[in-house]
Image (cartoon, grey):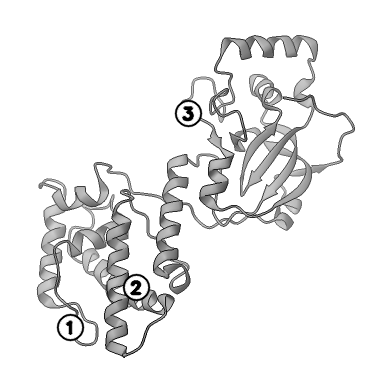
């Protein structure tokens, strides 16, 4: 049950934080749609009054819902107002009506929808930690030029501080490349060169080291940082990884494998054993929403919803 009373509901996501961290685009008014209740994951202004399943947190609110139901049994039929971000929705007005719909066990509710353009995939199950990690990763890619150099590659890290070390690797390579070429290399070009000649070969080396299964909870950037720990050798001609650096990197990986003291890995990934995650690319547009079979366009109702 998506909104079951016995489930661990967690907290609602705050729309303003999501908008700021994901740099949402402009709003487009879509119209009145029938939306899945389980896809409503946040609120614009009342995240502390309801839990993640839209159950009231206080006795006062619970009592108020009883009064509303007694006075207006069809309250949950009045459309609520929501903001859509990719596949998720945030309530602007109608928190109590949605709470009543949840109590009734409804799986859909009518809503007037204003859609915000999003570059990232947001849906039921998305957490605020993933959104914050996505912001850090986005800033890292923009600062280093990787967003333009390799736009389809993502760099998830469990430890936000590790982005400083990863950025240092990219910028140091850009300096060496510019000196080797005798010209100032643009960030996107340098970032692409770093990815092709440093990052990708190092990750491939990590995959072939015989410990990839033991380090399956690591993302590729974490494998890269673990492998390069303590290595200061310059690249060989042709931008090849020196054999001595390769040997040291493999030794770092084996030392970080479970069953040994994971000092290098701990500095990169902390104590978490789950693979870090950032949000994928968003795939919802206004045109798609209007024709989506999972959303039913309804005529705008004349009844004005009560203020909440």
**Who's the residue at 14% across and 74% down the image?**
233
Badge 3 marks a residue whose secondary structure is loop
**Residue 294 spot, x, y in % from top left:** 70, 45
**Who's the residue at 19% across and 65% down the image?**
228
Which of the 4 image quarters holds residue 188?
bottom left
Q: Is residue 269 visible?
A: yes
Q: Residues within 10 Å of mark 3 (few under 14, many from 20)?
A: few
| Viewport quadrant of the N terminus | top right
- Tally the marks: 3
**Residue 99 spot, x, y in % from top left:** 65, 22
Disc 2 to disc 1, C-alpha distance: 16 Å
Q: Residues within 10 Å of mark 2 (few under 14, many from 20)?
A: some
Badge 2 marks a residue whose secondary structure is helix
Along the horizontal axis of the image, is 71 left or right of 280?
right
Along the horizontal axis of the image, is 308 left or right of 196?
right
Badge 1 marks a residue whose secondary structure is loop
Which of the 4 image quarters holds residue 88?
top right
Q: Residues within 10 Å of mark 1 (few under 14, many from 20)?
A: few
Q: Is residue 6 above or below residue 303?
A: above
**Upstream in sequence: badge 2 or badge 1:** 2
**Who's the residue at 38% across and 82% down the image?**
185
Which residue matches tag 1? 236
Q: Is residue 24 above or below residue 184?
A: above
Which residue matches tag 3? 10
């Amino acid at each position: 049950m998506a909104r079951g009373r016995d489930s661990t509901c967690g907290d609602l996501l705050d729309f303003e934080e999501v908008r700021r961290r994901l740099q949402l685009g402009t709003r487009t008014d879509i119209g009145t749609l029938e939306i899945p209740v389980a896809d409503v994951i946040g609120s614009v202004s009342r995240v502390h009054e309801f839990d993640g399943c839209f159950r009231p947190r206080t006795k006062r609110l619970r009592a108020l819902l009883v009064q509303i139901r007694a006075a207006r049994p069809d309250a949950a039929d009045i459309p609520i107002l929501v903001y859509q971000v990719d596949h998720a929705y945030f309530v602007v007005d109608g928190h109590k009506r949605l709470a009543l719909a949840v109590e009734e066990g409804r799986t859909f509710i009518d809503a007037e929808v204003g859609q915000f353009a999003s570059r990232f995939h947001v849906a039921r199950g998305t957490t605020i930690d993933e959104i914050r990690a996505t912001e850090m990763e986005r800033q890292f890619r923009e600062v280093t030029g990787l967003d333009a150099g390799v736009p389809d590659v993502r760099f998830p890290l469990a430890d936000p501080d590790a982005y400083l070390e990863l950025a240092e690797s990219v910028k140091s390579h850009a300096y060496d490349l510019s000196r080797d070429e005798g010209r100032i290399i643009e960030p996107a070009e340098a970032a692409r060169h770093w990815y092709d000649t440093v990052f990708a070969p190092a990750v491939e080396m990590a995959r072939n080291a015989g410990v990839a299964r033991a380090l399956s909870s690591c993302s590729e950037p974490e494998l890269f940082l673990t492998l390069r720990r303590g290595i200061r050798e310059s690249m060989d001609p042709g931008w090849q990884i020196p054999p001595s650096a390769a040997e040291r990197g493999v030794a770092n990986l084996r030392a970080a494998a479970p069953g040994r003291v994971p000092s290098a890995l701990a500095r990169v990934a902390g104590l978490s054993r789950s693979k870090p995650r950032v949000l994928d690319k968003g795939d919802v547009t206004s045109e798609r929403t209007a024709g989506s079979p999972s959303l039913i366009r309804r005529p705008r109702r004349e009844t004005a919803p009560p203020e909440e």
